[in-house]
Amino acid sequence: MLTAILTLCFNMVPFTMAAQDETIVFTPQWTAQAQFAGYYVAEAKGFYREAGVKVHIEHPTPTQPAMARLQHNQCQATTLQLCQALEIVDGGIPLVNILQTSMNNAMVIVSARNEDPLKQKGARVGIWSVGFGQLAICMSIMDHLNYEFVRFAQNVNLFVAGALDATLAMSYNEYYQLVQAGITVTDKNVYRFCDHGYNVQEDGVYMTRSYYEKHRNQAIRFAQASKRGWEYAAKHPDEALDIVMKYVDREKIGTNRVMQQLMLQEVLRLQVDRESKKREFRLRPDMVKRASHLMVQNRMLDREVTYQELIAK
């Protein structure tokens, strides 16, 4: 439904109106990598320009994370996981989801010594210091595992060094870092949240509701051109990877082409809905309800945040 509305509105908005609007500064929630390939493609291929919207991609810094930039009007759009967005809205900052890219959850727990994560009660488990671990905390409580979460900044060094019993990982990122580091991963020592009742969507593009309501036409064009970028990346993954690596090199990110290729393949796979088998680009009401209920139940939210609060109107 949202895609259809966006398409209709996109075709109705005059090009000249959007062209007069101010530049959208877009800040992905992390440093340059294939997780954001569609936006890089949209910029590099001129899709934003063709849509009549001016977009400038600026990555976050350690002192200026993406959400802080959005709050301080240093950017107008950012990517957030659904659970993050729920926390922010519950905290009093209304947000609008203008484009949903993830249709499936990517989070996993990888255990050391080929242990089953569900049998590691009280285990020391690595978790990101910047967030993203809400579902893992819910799972630890609800399954009576009582994990001791140990925060890490951005890599798997603590786990590889043997300081942790297990670590959280994204199937498109840290999971492959562990593989490259020589860690054995099997069905026995990898717990995939999407297979255990926690298949909650992750990345979507968000704006503050106040900005969206003032720049609705511009936001619609930005969302449509971004969607076009992702569709192009799915059809031309090798070209998309070339574009990603240009951004990676420009930002001087310590990675490699093999890692980014694996990331792009997995991110694109996660964009295909399990039920429809299609790349839908929509926020699912049932997943919003599921995530909100879990987080209220485990005292991460003071109230349930509804689908209607998040969608563009």
Image: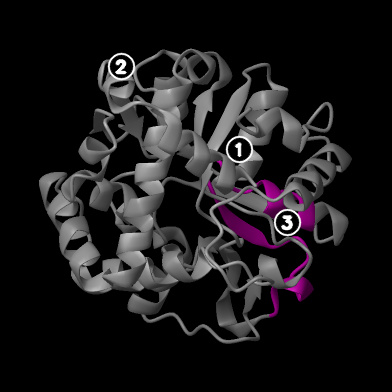
86 sits to left or right of 226: right
Q: Secondary structure at mark 1?
A: helix
279 lies above or below 211? below
Q: Which mark is residue 137?
A: none
- In the rendered picture of this protein, how many numbered marks are placed on residues? 3
Q: How much space separates mark 2 and mark 1, taking CA atoms?
A: 29 Å
Sequence order check, earlier mark of 2 and 1? 2
157 lies above or below 56? below
Sequence order check, earlier mark of 2 and 3? 2
Q: Which residues are magenta?
A: 116-139
Instruction: Find disc 3 in the rendering and name its residue.
Output: 147
Disc 2, disc 3: CB below 8 Å? no
* Residue name at image x 58 percent, y 49 percent: 150
Q: Which mark is residue 21?
A: 2
Q: Is residue 129 magenta?
A: yes
Instruction: Find disc 1 in the rendering and name its residue.
Output: 84
Is residue 28 visible from the viewing direction of this image?
yes
The C terminus - image quarter: top right
180 sits to left or right of 278: left
Q: Amino acid at mark 1?
A: Gln
Q: Position of residue 58 (x, y in %)?
A: 26, 32
Q: Amino acid at mark 3?
A: Tyr
Q: Residues within 10 Å of mark 3 (few under 14, many from 20)?
A: many
Q: Position of residue 151 (x, y in %)?
A: 54, 46
Q: Secondary structure at mark 2?
A: loop
Q: Position of residue 104 (x, y in %)?
A: 61, 62
Is residue 161 visible from the viewing direction of this image?
no
Q: How much space separates mark 2 and mark 3, taking CA atoms?
A: 49 Å
